[in-house]
Amino acid sequence: MRDLSRVRVMGPLAPLAEGFRQELAEQGYSPHTALRHLQLMGHLSRWLADSGLDGSQLAGRGVQEYLEARRVAGYHSFSTVRAAAPVLGYLRGQGVVPAAEDAVGTGATQALLSRYAHYLRVERGLVDVTIERQVFLARRILSAWEQTGRVDPRDLTAAEVTVFVLDHCRDARGSVSEVVPALRSLLRFLHVTGVIDQPLASAVPSMASWKLTGLPKALPGEQVTALLASCDRDSVVGRRDLAIVTVLARLGLRAGEVAALQLGDIDWRLGEITVRGKGNRSERLPLPPDVGEVLVEYLTAGHPGTAAAGGTVFVRVRAPHGPLTRGAVTQVVARAAQRAGFAPFYAHRLRHTAATGMLRAGGSLVEIGQVLRHHRPSTTAIYAKVDVETLRTVARRWPGTLS
């Protein structure tokens, strides 16, 4: 096996080669795979030097131009964006390649979207996946305004906002539930930052909505047991998945909250866990003994270590050992359901299961709302529908019956 230290990187990326080599080792890459990534970095650095460029040109189209040049040169492997993700991610982390927020462009609309993304992250405390969705919807809204000849949002009036929503309802009914809240968010940002003088968010018409019309879908106890039993405790993946499913089913966390858990969030001495929820809020919950046991089992015989995971509790088993995403957490539940022979369901079903279990054990709606970290009692009220015994005490006798 070729020694990684003998792979030489020439050109503008040469000062970063040693750091990249160390990061590959920390993330659990095999020597052979790390060698290939280092060679890709060397080839990329030579291409930049030959083209008279530096890393700042690797945002957006620059990456595609490099990969096209690599394929033209006869390289058939490591010639896709996915293959180049480790080196590009490292360069982005070092500030060599602009972050997505800084590379959206120089036009007026792109600059506005960049500021909007910064506002959502700093002022609203939203996570990256939500920011990406909000910016995507804002781009659609601004594009629709531009098509009507209104390039400058400062010209907007309340009447035009209302007309826009009504027109959108006729043309794209399926996405109204997303676009209307996104429009309000964008208009609040424009007003707060002084782009528009009037608080036009209040001019967005409300949608018809029927809350609390359904029943929360919870799993019966035997299905939860089967779900947990489907995780192989003799494998690294199984121990991790068992810990994830247990945390979801016992604590009622959201998938994104599980993905965001840090090793420092678990206070073993006090038996508490800090949950980082919506809006960047942090709240503490008791750590039940059974949850603590499966976490200890995973952390001591499956977790790749703090250096590889960056302090995150739940990480990828295979390199790179990065944090699991919200989508990856919910897919863990889907795979467990498939192994147990159930119809497909995802992580939020376990949140309903935890709440329903607390209700059947005698917990009040107030207590359930505290555990689920609801900020409005109306959000928890839906679980009153599954408390059949209590509902029987308040049900009126059907006319014409004796009892």
Image (tube, rainbow, N blue to C red):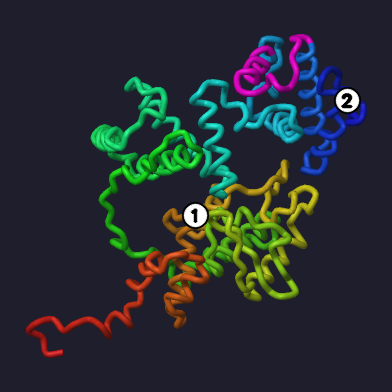
State whether residue 200 is above or below residue 226: above
Q: Is residue 1 left or right of residue 248?
A: right
Describe residue 16's horizontal placement relative to residue 302 as left or right.
Answer: right
Q: Is residue 9 left or right of residue 343?
A: right
Quadrant in the picture for residue 384: bottom left
Examine the rendering and report whether any part of residue 172 can be seen: no
Q: Is residue 209 above or below residue 178?
A: below
Q: Amino acid at mark 1?
A: Gln
Magenta stretch, main secondary structure class: helix
Image quadrant in which the N terminus is located: top right
Q: Quadrant of residue 359?
A: bottom left
Q: Do we see residue 299 in this rendering?
A: yes
* Residue 32 in which image quadrant: top right
Q: Is residue 246 left or right of residue 182?
A: right
Residue 141 position within the rendered picture, expressed as x and y whole percent measured from the top left: 39, 32
Q: Residue at x 32, y 78 (%)?
A: 388
Query: Amino acid under label 2?
Result: Val
Looking at the picture, how far across and down is residue 333, in whole percent?
53, 56
Residue for badge 1: 338
Which is nearer the eye, 154 or 206?
154
Which disc, if any, is residue 182?
A: none
